[in-house]
Image (cartoon, rainbow, N blue to C red):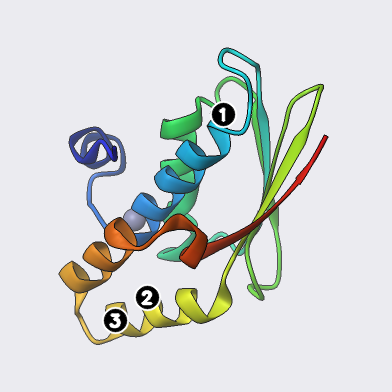
Amino acid sequence: MVDIELLKRFHTHIGPFVILGYRIGEYARKEFPENSKIRCEIRIRTSPPVSCMIDGIQISTGCTLGRGLIKVIENDGHGVSINFFSSEKSVKIRLREEKTSRILKMLKENRINESVDFVMNSDIDELVVSDEKD
Ligand SMILES: [Zn+2]
């Protein structure tokens, strides 16, 4: 369940990418045993709206900047990949670029509510690809 109120308080506004980040974090957490300490490395171009994801990820995983558990690596904007790892395993998640483009197009056309609904209601597997390694 996406905690929209919490996202809004932390991030000040609601958009598709902060929700997407939250959902990705929620999904990744389930791949690790409960209470395991996970870290996150994200390769992304750090400019909104796509980088709004970083806030969503921090909220749903506890991999926060203040705890030193998230590292953001600037890339050239071609694709976003997120690596979650503990001492036991890692889970690598990539955004599906065609879905990212679709969301960006909606934002460009000011169809914000539609973009939020799209990210809230799509299966996470339709939005991202994940590989798991033990
Ligand atoms: Zn945002």
Name the residue carrying label 1. 63
Q: Earlier in the sequence, mark 3 or mark 1?
A: 1
Q: Residue at x 40, y 65 (%)?
A: 49
- Quadrant of res 12: top left
The three-letter amino acid code for the residue at tag 1 is Cys
Q: Where's residue 124, x and y in %?
A: 45, 56
| Residue 93 vertical position relative to residue 5 in the rendered view, above or below | below
From mark 2 to mark 3, how far is it between C-alphas? 5 Å
Q: Residue 123: give its label.
A: none
The three-letter amino acid code for the residue at tag 2 is Ile
**If the image is split into quadrants, where does the C terminus sit?**
top right
Q: Are marks 2 and 3 in contact (CB under 8 Å)?
A: yes
Other-residue count near label 2 (Cα within 10 Å), few / some / many at <14 / 14–19 / ≥20: many
Q: Where's residue 101, x and y in %?
A: 46, 81
- Queried on whether the Cβ of the residue with tag 2 lies below 8 angstroms from ligand 1, the answer reads no
Q: How many numbered circles are shown?
A: 3
Q: Are marks 1 and 2 in contact (CB under 8 Å)?
A: no
Name the residue carrying label 3. 106
Name the residue carrying label 2. 103
* Horizontal side, residue 4 vs residue 81: left or right: left
* Horizontal side, residue 25 vs residue 2: left or right: right
Mark 2 falls on what kind of element?
A: helix
From mark 3 to mark 1, how far is it between C-alphas? 29 Å
- Quadrant of res 68: top right
Q: Residue at x 50, y 25 (%)?
A: 62
Q: Residue at x 74, y 25 (%)?
A: 86
From mark 1 to mark 2, how far is it between C-alphas? 25 Å
Other-residue count near label 3 (Cα within 10 Å), few / some / many at <14 / 14–19 / ≥20: some
**If the image is split into quadrants, where does the N terminus sit?**
top left
